[in-house]
Image (tube, rainbow, N blue to C red):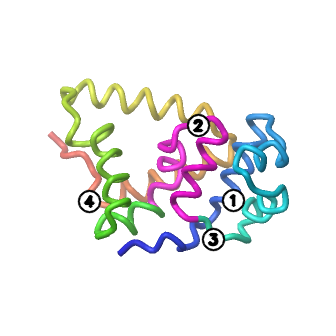
Amino acid sequence: MYNYERYIPNAGKFFKELRKEKGITQKELAKKLGITQGAVSHFEKDDSKLTLKTCQKITEALGEPFDLFIQWNYVEIFKNIIDSEDPEAKEILQQFHTTYGEDSQTPEHEKEDELKHEIALKADLLNSAGKQKTIEYMDDLADNPKYKKDSK
């Protein structure tokens, strides 16, 4: 079963950078989340164990869809929930697959174009450090035969 209390490395850093890019103060975010400013400061320093559900609430409170967080941190999250027996984890994974994966009804070449466009849009939201981290994640995936394109 997926451990929702598992520490997700650098999640706080992600939320802090996103909050600053949005021009939202810790106090404003705290109000949206119904928590204290100190609690926001605490999780932004990665001093808190954030649950997957909490990450979803924070992302949405910052005015972004949850898939932005999933895409940013997909390696850390998906390696732990793919085999999960937890119904909530399975639902989140199914939503992701329905939107981006094999369950989509979009023809393959259109899916590729949509994915390339989505990657470019998300990359534009990232600062240099975020873009570098994305490249590192993509390098890790490219080294894994499970994710490599079939060469034709």
Residue 142 in the image: state x and y as whole percent: 36, 53
Q: Residues within 10 Å of mark 4 (few under 14, many from 20)?
A: few
Quadrant of the image for the N terminus? Answer: bottom left
Q: Please report whichever mark, 3 or 1, sits nearer to the chain's N-terminal start.
A: 1
Q: Please report whichever mark, 2 or 1, sits nearer to the chain's N-terminal start.
A: 1
As drawn, the residue found furthest toward the front would be 34
Q: How far separated are the C-alphas under marks 2 and 4? A: 32 Å
Q: Residues within 10 Å of mark 1 (few under 14, many from 20)?
A: many
> Which SS type dominates the magenta stretch?
helix
Residue underneath mark 2? 64
Nearer to us of marks 3 and 1 is 3
The relative height of residue 33 versus residue 140 in the rendered view (above or below) is: above
Q: Amino acid under label 1?
A: Gly
The secondary structure type at the circle numbered 1 is helix
Q: Please report whichever mark, 2 or 4, sits nearer to the chain's N-terminal start.
A: 2
Residue that appears at 37% across and 65% down:
81
Q: How far separated are the C-alphas under marks 3 and 2? A: 21 Å
Nearer to us of marks 3 and 4 is 3
Residue underneath mark 1? 12
The relative height of residue 74 versus residue 121 in the rendered view (above or below) is: below
Residue closer to the observer: 107 or 89 = 89
Q: Which mark is residue 49?
A: 3
Residue that appears at 31% across and 58% down:
90
